[in-house]
Image (tube, rainbow, N blue to C red):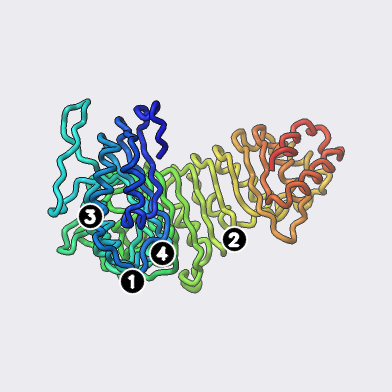
Amino acid sequence: MYPINEMNHLVQTVMIDIDFWSILNGRAIRLLDNSDVVYSTARTLNISFRQNELGYNEIISDPIACVLQFMDIVRKIMPRLRDVNIEHCTNYDIGNRAFFLAFKKLLCQSFETSDPTYYSPPVTDLETQVYIAPSLTSLKFAWNIYHEQTAQLIHNNAQSLKSLSLMFNHMDSIQTLVQSTSGEPIVFPNLLKLSFSCWHYLESNCKPTTNVTGAFPRLQSMYLNMDYPFKDDTLFRGTSNTLEYLSMNVNTEVIEMAQKYKVFGGNKYPNLRAFRIKNINTRLMRPGAPSKAATKFALSVSSKLEILSVEDIAMEATIVPSIVEHGHMSSLQLLAIPDAFLTLSHIVVLLEQTPMLTDLHCHYTGVGTLFECVEDDQLPVVFAQKYAPLSNNFRVLQLGHWGNTDIAVVARCAMLMVIACPRFTYASVSSHLREKMRKCILELMSHDSFIQYAARFETLLYRG
C-alpha cells in the first residue's frame, strides 16, 4: 500500500503482499496502525501471503486476537470494502495447526460467512443506502492435510466466489468440494474461473457424485493442470452453455470417461472457443492407444474452436489428415501442435482446410511429398503458381527446429509463406537460431528465384 494522501480518494483496489507470520507477531499490525492512510472509496482488497510462515513447533500466545486486530485495522483503512481476493503461497504444506485456525478466522472475519462465533455489523454503502458485507470473490489455496477445513472455507464462500484455484498434494475427499459431508450438493452460482494443479502425480480415489447436477452454472474457464480428479463428469455438468476456455491433461481414462458420459460431441459446447490439452504422461495411455487418440478427442469437443493446442510428446503428423477428415474447423485461428513434425506439404493442406488460421506452432522437417520432385531453385516459382494466394489470414509461423534439420530449410519455408500468404510477416524460431536464420534469408534473397519478392522478405529479417 502506498500512502499518497492526495490521491487516496481515487484508489479502487488495495493490494497487500504480506507474510502471515507478520500478522501473528504484531509487526504488520504496528505498521498499519501507525498509518493514517484511508482509502475511502476502495472496494476491492487483494491479499497475497507468499512467505513461509510457521513451523510445526512454533507457538503463538493468542493468534485469533492478532487476526481480529489486523482485520479491524483493514476495515478502518477501507470502510467501503466489498470484494476480497486471497492468494496463499501453495509451494509448501501448512504445517502448523495454530496458523491454519488463525487463517480460517481471518477469512471468517473478512467476509460474510456462516461462522457463528463472530458477528460484525455490515458496512453501509453510501450510494445505495443498503447494507453490504464484504465477500470473498477469489481464493488461491492448497488442498492438503487440512482439506476438511479448506472445504468448509470454500463452502462458506460458495455464493460469492468468482475464481477458485487449488493446488493439490492430497486427493483425499476431493468430492467434498462439490458436496457437503452429508451428501448435499454445493453450488457455486457466480464462479467464472476454476483452476486445479498439483505438485506431483496423484491418483484420485474419488467416488462418483451422482447427486451433483451442476456445481458451476456460470463457469467460463476451466484449467486442469493435472489429471482429471473425478471418475465421472462432475466438473462438466451444467457448463455446456457457458464454458469458453478449457485446458486439461488427457489420458485413456479421461477419454473413456468423456465418451461414457457423453461430455462432448453434437455441438454440446457452442460457446467454447479455446481448448488446450496435454498428454505428458504416456504411461497412462494404454498400450496400443495411438497418439491420434488425443487428437481425435480434441477435435470432437467443438466445431467452433478458435484456439486449439495439443501437446503430446508422442504426437505424429497424423494430426493433419485427422483435421482434414474432421472437416469442421472453419473458425480455427490458432493451432499449436508443438510436438508435431510437419512438412511444407502438411502446412499447405492445413491452410486449405482452415481458412481463418492466423497462427501455427509446430516442428518443421522439410518440403514433404507434394514438393519432393521439385528442385530447390524452382520451388518459389512452382509454389507461387500453384498455391498463391494460399491464405489471406495466415500471419505467424512458430517453428520448432529439430536437431538434424538445416536452418536454411526452415528459412526457405518462411519465405515461401511470404510468397503465398499476403499477410504473412512473422516466422519465429528459437532465440539462439535467429541470427543464423536471418543470414540464411539474406543469402536466399539474392537467388534469382527469390529476388523478385525481396521487398516482402524485409519483415522476416527483423522479427524472430
**335 horizontally vs 286: left or right:** right
Dot 4: what SS? Answer: loop
> Disc number at residue 65?
3
Q: SS for tag 2?
A: loop
Closer to the camera: disc 2 or disc 3?
3
Give the residue type at disc 3: Ala
Give the residue drawn at x 53%, y 54%. 322
Residue 199 picture quarter: bottom left
Upstream in the sequence, badge 4 or badge 2? Answer: 4
Residue at which label 4 appears: 92
Q: Nearer the viewer, mark 3 or mark 4?
A: 3
Task: Point out residue 197 in the picture as x, y percentages from the top left corner.
Answer: 41, 59
The kind of secondary structure element at disc 1 is loop
Note whether 102 is above or below 399 in the view shown: below
Q: Which residue is disc 2 drawn over?
A: 316
Q: Residues within 10 Å of mark 4 (few under 14, many from 20)?
A: few
Mark toward the viewer: 4 or 1: 1
Residue type indicated by callout 2: Glu
Q: How far apart in space, not on screen, are marks 2 and 3 (Cα)?
A: 61 Å
Please indicate whether residue 234 sits to the left or right of residue 320 in the image. Answer: left
| Alpha carbon distance from label 4 to label 1 | 16 Å
Q: Is residue 126 left or right of residue 267?
A: left
